[in-house]
Structures are given as structure tokens and as C-alpha cells.
Image (tube, rainbow, N blue to C red):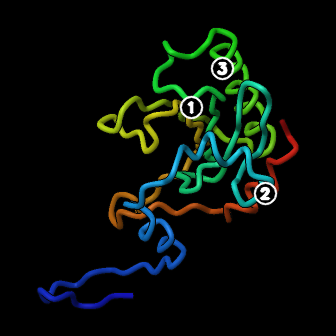
Amino acid sequence: MRNDDTTGARVERLFAPWRMEYVKTADEKNEGCIFCLKPREEDRRSNLILHCDDLTIVMLNKYPYNSGHLMVIPRSHVASLAALPGAEFDALFRMTNRAIEVLRGVYRPDGFNMGMNFGRIAGAGIDEHIHVHIVPRWGGDTSFMPVLGETKVVSEHLLATYESLVGKF
């Protein structure tokens, strides 16, 4: 839809009402760490938790960059790799490898982006509990939308992604 804004310039509008939840909660302070609290709750589906074991958690990113964007999280509430106990360090990266295998089997991506952000200034949304992001990538998944429209199109509903991946770990 194209309209004039208050300056008289022509602007494009893309309506995405589901983003309002993010906008409304972006500045709210959560009571406690979601990576510590959510796995304790019974409703794994609404919390987007795909897998929990004694050392790791696998959960979908609630605001994904692409379909299948997930996080692998150690159980220990630490802000750095150096603070992570040795067994948990090993388990974190074994589960990260397993998550890539699962995503490869279910979605058949052409590649992956994988990363960790340490500290708010580095882009960590939750900086007090380390976690690994894994984002499946396909040829052609970047289009004109992010460049021209500053909008990322995610092609699958989050709960459909959950249903595709739950039980695969």
C-alpha cells in the first residue's frame, strides 16, 4: 500500500500486526532469565522449546531471522564461555552440531549462519546467559525486502517450524 507521509513523500507500508507483541514487550524487564525459567514450565510448545537435557536446551528464536532459526543454550546461567563448566562447554557444541544436522535433514538449507553475541553492545538481546544462534540459509532467501523495505520476510509460521522440528533431537 502506498501513501503520502506527513512530509508529502511517498512511502510503502507493510502491515505485520503480529509484530505488535514484540513492540509492546521490547522495553519490559523480564523477571529472571527466560533461558532459565522457560524450560521449567510445562508448556514447551508455547515456549518454543524443542529439546532439554541435563546440560543443554534447544529453543526456537521467538523473533527469527529465517525459518528454523534456533538457539542452543547451556543450562548454566553464565555470560561467557570461560565461565562454562567443561562438560557443559562440550555438550553445548555437541548439541550445536546436532541442531545443524536436524535443520539440514528437515529443511535442506544451502548453508548456515551461526554465532554468539557477548554483551549488549555486540548485539546480545540476552547477555547474561550465553547461547548459540543457528540460522538456516538458502540461495535466494535474501531479496529486495531487507534492502529496500527494511523488512525481513519469514516464510513459515513459528509454530509450524516448531512442529517440524520437535521430536527430532
Which residue is pictured at 56% across the width and 53% down the height? 64
Front tag of 2 and 3: 2
Left or right: 59, with 168 as reference point: left
Which residue is pictured at 76% across the width and 27% down the height? 98
Amino acid on which disc 3 is placed: Phe
Cα–Cα gap, marks 1 and 2: 23 Å
Query: Label for residue 132?
Result: 1
Cα–Cα gap, marks 2 and 3: 26 Å
Left or right: 97, with 139 as reference point: right
Cα–Cα gap, marks 1 and 3: 9 Å
Q: Give the secondary structure at mark 3.
A: helix
Q: Seen from this angle, which residue lies furthest front?
A: 31
Percent position of residue 137, x then y: 58, 43
User: Does residue 112 lie above or below 42 as drawn?
Assistant: above
Q: Nearer the viewer, residue 101 or 32?
A: 32
Q: Which residue is mark 2?
A: 43
Among the 4 quarters of the image, the one containing residue 76:
top right
Amino acid on which disc 2 is placed: Asp
Percent position of residue 124, x then y: 41, 39
Instruction: State the quadrant of the C terminus.
Output: top right
Q: Nearer the viewer, residue 104 or 96?
A: 96
Q: Give the secondary structure at mark 1.
A: strand
Amino acid on which disc 1 is placed: Val
